Image (cartoon, rainbow, N blue to C red):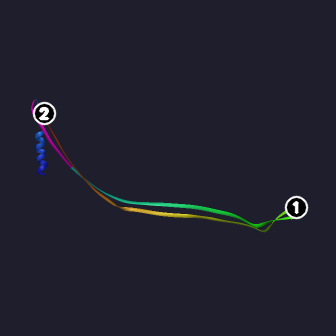
Amino acid sequence: MKKVVGLAILATLFTSPALAGETFVLNQWTIQGSRTETNLNIDIVTNSNRTQDYSSSSDKMYIDGTVETEYNNGNVRKSVKNYTLQNTGSELNGSFNEKMTTRVWGTINTIMNSYTSSHESSAGIR
């Protein structure tokens, strides 16, 4: 407190108006300080839903047998023996559902201190 009063007295002496032709001297100090405190409370809830439908299928045909050729009086005859035809297929259908809830909560406390000092001096004749 004594420093502030002393600076105030010095400031009034040096900043008093000067008459024309007089010399003057300006010697000024500025000291500033600040403090900022922040308390931030957060509570965030996120809900998400996902739905997925899917379908797949496959088909397969398989032919089995032997081809025999017969010759009879100049005629050619082809025949298939032990003939098997297999046709298979499959299909898959489904869906997937997901529901999620995410919550983030807490407190963020911050303190910021700032200090500034500056000095200005000048001299001259008015």
Residue that carries the numbered disc 2 in the rendered image: 124
Helix, strand or loop at disc 1?
strand
Q: Position of residue 26 (x, y in %)?
A: 13, 38
Residue at 14%, 48% in the rendered image: 4
Q: Position of residue 28 (x, y in %)?
A: 15, 42
Which range is magenta?
Answer: 21-32
| Amino acid type indicated by mark 1 | Asn
Residue 15 seen in this snapshot: no
In the rendered image, residue 7 lying in the magenta stretch gets the answer: no
Name of the residue lying farthest toward the right = 73
Residue 4 seen in this snapshot: yes
Query: Which numbered dot is residue 75?
Result: 1
Name of the residue lying farthest toward the bottom = 82
Name of the residue lying farthest toward the left = 22
Residue at 41%, 62% in the rendered image: 103
In-image side of 14 versus 68 (left or right): left
Instruction: Compute the Cα span from label 2 to label 1.
Output: 135 Å
